[in-house]
Image (cartoon, rainbow, N blue to C red):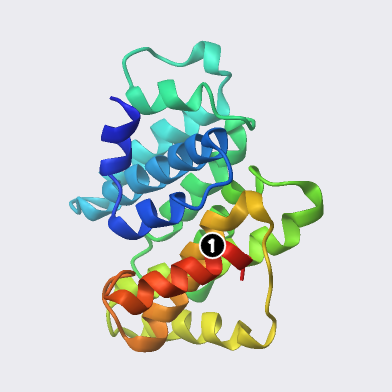
Amino acid sequence: MSHAEDLSALPLGLRLALAYASSSSTREAMLTLLLLDQRLAAILRQGGEPVIAQIKLAWWRDQLGEAPSHWPAGEPLLERLRAWPADPSRLVPLVDGWEALLAEDLTLSAMEQFAAGRAAAWTALGTADEAGAIGRAARDWALADLALHLGQDGEAEAARRWVLADRAHPLRLGRGMRPLAVLRALSRRALERGAAELIDGPGALLVALRSGLTGR
């Protein structure tokens, strides 16, 4: 698939966030990460027996834990991951995080593992100096995104409280991580407004612009 086809596979909010990448190489690396994240999400959305989802997730865990030279040919996403700038094994926690959501009862511990998995994946693309801020931003986005997709359940309210309680601790991301800053800002806005989508009108575009320029 071409870059344009890969990009079009993402929801609008994610595509908008990537527009604020500081370089084409950064955009490609983040696009690959988001495509993997979406692939793992699709495994859970397919429903059916949890054991089938676990088998599919285990396949991805095994591949990411292997050296790229051992990967099978013919999987377009694995081909993209060969060019990923960080060690692919650092994406294993992302798989583990999605698997945690398969639990029959979605506990706070499972939600935290999911958020930690996304945080680990994004942190792999940043600098050591910014690791703490990247981790917090990715965790906020993960929990807000989870709450938006859980609807009005008690688990959604728990995730919502976690995210909004962190408003007293602002953070700012550098230019290399502006797409993540945009995702965090848009998801928090959607959560506060009770919106179902990240992009729900001109106000969302203004939030994305401000966050993309300032990193907040």
Question: Relative to residue 141, is residue 91 depicted above or below?
Answer: above
Q: Can see residue 202?
A: yes
Q: Can see residue 112?
A: no
So how many labels did they put on this image?
A: 1
Question: Relative to residue 189, is residue 82 depicted above or below?
Answer: above
Q: Residue at x 53, y 47 (%)?
A: 21
Q: Which residue is mark 1?
A: 212
Quarter of the image that includes the N terminus: top left
Which residue type carries mark 1? Gly
In this rendering, position of residue 153 left or right of residue 58: left
Q: Residue at x 55, y 33 (%)?
A: 25
Residue situated in front as seen by the camera: 95 or 52: 95
Residue situated in front as seen by the camera: 64 or 178: 178
Image spot of residue 157 (x, y percent): 40, 86
Question: Relative to residue 35, is residue 86 depicted above or below?
Answer: above
Instruction: Locate residue 195: give its quadrant.
Output: bottom left
Q: Secondary structure at mark 1?
A: helix
Image spot of residue 203 (x, y percent): 36, 79
Q: Residue furthest right?
A: 129
